[in-house]
Image (spheres, helix red, strand yellow):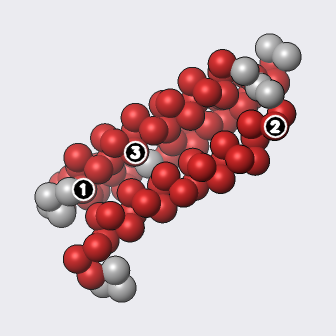
Amino acid sequence: ITLGRFDVAAVIGFFFAALLLWIVAVAPHQLGWPFWLGCAGVAAQIVWHFFLIKGRTREGCFIAFSKSHWMGVCLFAGVALGYALR
C-alpha cells in the first residue's frame, strides 16, 4: 500500500540492497569461493522472486514470501563454509 505501483521494484531493490550490504560487510574477511557462491545463490533467488511477484498474483506473492528464507540459508552456508575452509 505504501509503495503503490512501485511495490515490485521496491521489494527487488530492497533485496539487492541487502545483498550489497552483506557483500560490503563480509568481503573484507576474504572467505573465498563459498561466500561468492552463496551470494550468487541469493542473486538467483532474487531474480526468481521477481518473476514470481511481477504479476502481483496471490499465489506468486505467497510462494515468494514463503520461500524467502532460502536467501538467508545461502548466505549462512556461504559464510560458514568460507570460515570452515580458511
Q: Secondary structure at mark 2?
A: helix
**Direction from residue 10 to residue 54 in the image, left or right:** left
N-terminal of the pair, mark 1 or mark 2, is 2
The residue wearing badge 1 is 53
| Image point (61%, 27%), residue name | 36
Q: Secondary structure at mark 3?
A: helix
Q: Relative to residue 8, is residue 32 depicted above or below?
A: above
Give the Cα separation between the discs numbered 1 and 2. 33 Å
Give the Cα separation between the discs numbered 3 and 1. 11 Å
Residue type, label 3: Ile
Q: Quadrant of the N terminus?
A: bottom left
**Mark 2 neighbour density, 10 Å: few (under 14) some (14–19) many (20 or more):** few
The residue wearing badge 2 is 28
Q: Quadrant of the C terminus?
A: top right
Residue type, label 1: Ile
The residue wearing badge 3 is 46
Residue type, label 2: Pro
Judged by depth in the image, the label closer to the viewer, 3 or 2, is 2
Give the Cα separation between the discs numbered 3 and 2. 23 Å
**Direction from residue 56 to residue 1 in the image, left or right:** right
| Image point (23%, 49%), residue name | 52
The answer to whether residue 74 of the structure is visible from this angle is no
Judged by depth in the image, the label closer to the viewer, 1 or 2, is 2
**Mark 1 neighbour density, 10 Å: few (under 14) some (14–19) many (20 or more):** many
Q: Relative to residue 11, is residue 74 depicted above or below?
A: above
